[in-house]
Amino acid sequence: MDVIAWLLDSDPAVRWQVLRDLVAAPADEVARKRARVAREGWGARLLRSQEPDGSWGGGAYFPVPNPDEGHEDRQPWTATAFVLQQLCQFGVDPADPRVHAAVTQVARNVRWEADGRPFFDGEVEPCINGMTVVLGVWFGHVAEAGGVVGRLLADRLGDGGWNCWTWTGATVSSFASTLDVLEGLLAYERATGGSAEITAARREAEEFLLDRRLFRRRSTGEPAAPAFTQFSFPARWHYDVLRALDYFRLADRYDPRMDEALDLVAAKRPPDGTWLLENTHPGAVPFVLEDGDGRPSRWNTLRALRVLDWAGRSGAQAHVDRGGQV
């Protein structure tokens, strides 16, 4: 199977990232393909589904009405925060007029359910605020993101990470909350230059994950949760080792303590050269991106290939004759 050709035969959101990260295509070609994300396919479909009030689904974190209310085993993914997260992961250009208009409406009209703050001013839970910082930076609301970062620094736990359940008495950081915040701090640091305090907090939180080999309990060495070794996309707020490795790739910080996680990613590649979708998180979605769990996943294949390539694992970098294919 020609995996690169299969990846390129996809939505613009996947195609432009393959060209940039796996094919090393010229920058102008990558830019042309990226520009299609807001006009065609999944990105355009999400932009067209925005409500007249500027929200998606009528809410910031939960849609109105909530189709899964009362079901603790699932969460709807159709509200504003998760739609913007998907647009960000698709790599939509924030300067595109369609995107700028949509995000302006969010900033003016959408408020968090928890405390009524404007969307880009953040919420009360660090996991949500980490995502909000990523979105604020991506969509040009860096000043508001700075205020959220200040609250995140104040919310750190003694072990260096974060936990969204501190309001119930949690004193130990969680993998998921810590990674949510790390992604936000890295985005803010890259956009603004950051500060010594932000860099130190980010490094200490990275140590929280690395000391646990990205998926093991520090106390026993056992895997902390089965889902941590099952790859999903979109991950939403959930944690798995592929998402964690993708963060360290973006941060460009290799550490030998992640080798076991890298081995796990490499071992999950079937003979056809793809990676599977393994753990779709239940809940209502705007639309389905892939063919379901147990089937080849373009998103997981793209993400696994570029993580392994970054880590210097053989066979990740691919070169193809692109004539007529893209």
Image (tube, grey):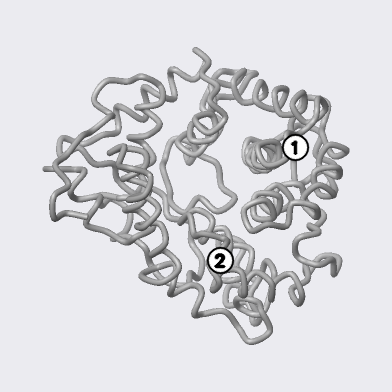
Q: Residue 42 bears which disc, if any?
A: none
> Which SS class for mark 1?
loop
- Percent coordinates x, y for residue 195 in the rendering: 80, 30
Residue 302, image quadrant? top left
> Which SS class for mark 2?
helix
Q: Which residue is mark 1?
A: 162
Q: Residue 83 bears which disc, if any?
A: 2
Q: Of 11 and 228, which appears nearest the observer?
A: 11
Residue 16 shown left or right of residue 207 in the figure: left
| Foreground disc of the pair 1, 2 | 2
Q: How dense is the environment of label 1, judged by Cα within 10 Å: few (below 14), some, or many (20 and up)?
A: many
- Percent coordinates x, y for residue 300 in the rendering: 36, 45
Q: Residue at x 73, y 40 (%)?
A: 192
Task: Identify the amino acid type marked 1.
Answer: Trp
Image quadrant containing the C terminus: bottom left
Q: Of 204 and 102, which appears nearest the observer?
A: 102
Q: How dense is the environment of label 2, judged by Cα within 10 Å: few (below 14), some, or many (20 and up)?
A: many
Q: Which residue extends farthest top?
A: 256
Query: Does 199 sit above or below residue 40?
Result: above
Task: Identify the amino acid type marked 2.
Answer: Val
- Percent coordinates x, y for residue 276 in the rendering: 29, 45
Q: Residue at x 36, y 49 (%)?
A: 28
Q: Residue at x 36, y 39 (%)?
A: 21
Residue 201 shown left or right of residue 254 in the figure: right
Labels 1 and 2: the sequence-earlier one: 2
> Between marks 1 and 2, how big is the CA–CA gap?
24 Å
Q: Residue at x 67, y 51 (%)?
A: 137
Residue 120 shown left or right of residue 103 in the figure: right
Q: Which residue extends farthest bottom?
A: 52
